Amino acid sequence: MNLTEKLAQKLQNLLSKKQIVDYVLYNNEYYKVEFNNKIDKNHHLNKPIEIEENSKGLYTIVWNDMEYSEGEVDNTYLNKIDEWIETAYENRLSLCDNEKIFIPSKSLYPLVICNDRQLSNSIYEPEYLFKIIKLIEETAKILNIRLDYNLEVIDGTKYLYSSRGITEEFIYTKFDLKITIPKVVNWSYTVSYQPSLKEISDILSFVGNYYEFFEKSKEVKTANLQNSSIVFSPQATEEILTEFFLSNFSSTNIVLDKSIYKIQDFIEKRKLFGRASIAYDPMLKQQPGSYRFTSYGTVAEKQYIVRLGKLNVPFGDNKNYLKFSLDTPTVEFVHFNNLTFEGIKTQPLFNFNNSNFVYCFSLSGMKNKNGRTFRLVINNAIYTNSRNKNRVPIVHLEIDLAKKFENSEIEFYTTPTKQKGMIIKI
C-alpha cells in the first residue's frame, strides 16, 4: 500500500467514526532521473546522474464548522500516520467570517493529456537522454566553452481523494532542460512531452548564436538606454511575470492586502489592462502546468484572470473564494507555460541585428518593490544602436510593470520552440 492509499484509508476511518467532518487529499507520486555536469568547489563532478522516487502531497482536514488543518505530507509518514494526525490536530486553524473550506464532490473531470509515453519510457531506457547530453557536449566543443546543463525527467501520477466520494488520478510527465553559460545565458525549456532532437538542436543553436554575438560585442561601462526597448529571454520573462502575477493575482495576497489590487477591484471588474485578456489554461496539451484538477479539487478549465482589460478572477485557494462572490475556488497557477495572452502584440523571434535594443538573457537579481515596480539587475546585456553592438557588464533597471500593462507597452515574441519572450519599452 502506497502513501496515498494509506493516508486516504486513515482519513476515511476517522470520517466513519465522526472524528472529522471532511477531508481533501492531493498526492503526487513520481520517479525522477536527473543529469547534470555541475562542478563542486573542489572541482569534482557532483552526482552526474541522480535518481529519486518519492510520494508527497497536500492535505486539508475539517474538524468542525470552524476549525481545519492543512499542510504537506511525504513518504516519511508511512510508518507514523497516527503521529501525523496528532500533529495536524494540534496545529488546527480557525476559519474567519466569509471563509469556507471547499470540499470537491462528485464531478466530471476532463480528459487532459499531461503525459507522453515516449518520455516516460526514456526514463527507464535513457538512450534518448544520453543523445541530448552528447548534443550539448558537441555544442560546447564547437563554441570552445563550458556549457553547464541540468536535465530532469519525471514520470508521475497525481491523486485526489475527498470525503465526498472522489477518487481521481492523472498521469503526467515532465521534461526540464536548463542550459547555462555563466553570466551570459540562462535558458530553460520545460514541457510534458519528449521534444525531438531537432528541437534541442534549435535551442543549442540559438544559445550558440547568441554567445558568438556576445563575444563580438564591444564592452562599454555605460550606455544610454533611453528610448530603447529591452528584449527579455523566455527564462527572464518567466521569472518576472511569474512573480508579478503570483504576487498580485493570488487570492490569499489580495485578502491579506499584499497585492496592488483589492477584492472590490475583482467584484467590480475594474478595467486596468487596456484591451488585453490574460488567462490560465490547464487544458493545454502536454504542458507542465496542465492538469485535470487542482490541488484542492476544482475542475480544470480555461480561466480568464483579466478579460478585455477588466480584472476577472484571481488565482483562488480553497477557502477565500466566497469573498470574491465565487461559488468555487478558481484555477491554480502551476507553470508559466500555461498563461495565455490575448490582445497583446506578438511577433516572431527577434533578429539580433536590430538597432536600438537591449538584449537581456540573464537576470542576476530581481526585487519586487511593491507589486508594481520591479528592480532588475542584468549581467552582460547587449545594447545595439545604428553603429555599434555594445556589451554592458551590469545594467540596473526599475520598471513599473503594472503601468506597462496598463499602457499597452508590453509585446511578446516567440522562439522556434514556441517559448514566450517579452519586449518592454523603456
Image (cartoon, rainbow, N blue to C red):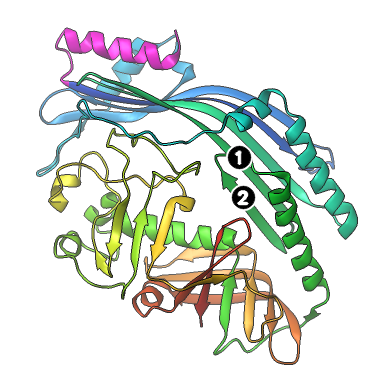
Q: In the visual, does 152 lie left or right of 93? A: right
Asked if 363 appears above or below 160 in the picture, the reply is: below
x and y percentages locating residue 56 in the rendered image: 45, 25
Lower position in the chain sequence, tag 1 or tag 2: 1
User: Residue 198, relative to residue 78: is it above or below?
Assistant: below
Can residue 48 be seen here? no
Secondary structure mostly seen in magenta is: helix
Which residue is disc 1 drawn over? 175
State the CA–CA distance, disc 1 to disc 2. 8 Å
| Image quadrant in which you'd find residue 160 | top left
- Would residue 425 appear left or right of 131 to someone viewing this image? left
Q: Residue at x 67, y 75 (%)?
A: 351
Closer to the camera in the image, 301 or 317: 301
Identify the amino acid type marked 2: Tyr
- Where is the N terminus found, in terms of image quarters? top left
**x, y (%) of residue 226?**
56, 89
Q: How packed is label 2: few (under 14 Cα within 10 Å), some, or many (20 or more)?
A: some
- Secondary structure category for the residue under label 2: strand
Q: Quadrant of residue 410?
A: bottom left
Which amino acid type is shown beneath numbered disc 1?
A: Phe
- Give the image location of residue 69, x and y in percent: 25, 28
Start-end of magenta stretch: 1-21
| Residue 68 position (above or below residue 77) | below
- The residue under the point 33% across, 60% down is 248
Q: Determine which residue is flagged by label 2.
A: 189
Q: Residues within 10 Å of mark 1 (few under 14, many from 20)?
A: many
In the picture shown, does residue 244 fall above or below 79? below
